[in-house]
Amino acid sequence: MSQTAPGRYESSFALDQYGSFVLRASTPKLGDNGELKPFASSYGHVTNPIRASTRASSPTSIAEACRAGRGGTLRPKPSDVFKSRH
């Protein structure tokens, strides 16, 4: 991991599954005998909520989702956004 600011480390990697993941990073320390020993651990989390195949990533699929929804509109007028539907 690369240090990007004091106490902040970042990395990029591909997730081939979806769900929530716990990340653990360990920092070793040189022991008296010259061997690396665990010193500190930090934890974080990342969530990949849906499969890549179901993400609406193109304008066509977003338009299709709007049509399939209950009266969804791709580019509504600002005045229409707050109209009551009752």
Image: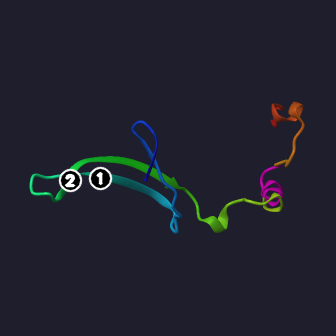
- Return the x and y of residue 77 as percentages of the image width and height: 90, 37
- Return the x and y of residue 35 as percentages of the image width and height: 16, 59
Which residue is depicted at the point 29% across and 52% down?
26
Query: Does the magenta stretch mainly form a helix, a strand or a loop?
Result: helix
The reply, left or right, for residue 72 in relation to residue 28 is: right
Check contact, mark 2 vs mark 1: CB within 8 A.
yes
- Name which residue type carries label 1: Ser
Foreground residue, 19 or 31? 31
Foreground residue, 41 or 81? 41
Crowding around mark 2 (Cα neighbors within 10 Å: few <14, some 14 to 19, many 20+) is: few
The reply, left or right, for residue 36 in relation to residue 73 is: left
Which residue is depicted at the point 59% across and 65% down?
51
Whether 75 is among the magenta residues is no
The reply, left or right, for residue 6 in relation to residue 72 is: left
Which quadrant holds the C terminus?
A: top right
Q: Would you name the residue on which mark 2 appears?
A: 38
Which residue is depicted at the point 83% across and 49% down?
71
Which residue is depicted at the point 66% across and 65% down?
54
| Magenta region, residue range | 62-71
- Distance between mark 2 and mark 1 Cα atoms: 7 Å
Q: Is residue 57 above or below residue 40?
A: below
Q: Residue furthest front?
A: 34
Mark toward the start of the polypeptide (2 vs 1): 1
Q: Is residue 55 above or below residue 42?
A: below
Q: Would you name the residue on which mark 1 appears?
A: 26
- Return the x and y of residue 1 as percentages of the image width and height: 43, 53
Which quadrant holds residue 6?
A: top left
Disc 1, SS: strand
- Name which residue type carries label 2: Pro
- Return the x and y of residue 78 as percentages of the image width and height: 87, 33
Crowding around mark 1 (Cα neighbors within 10 Å: few <14, some 14 to 19, many 20+) is: few
Foreground residue, 73 or 75? 75
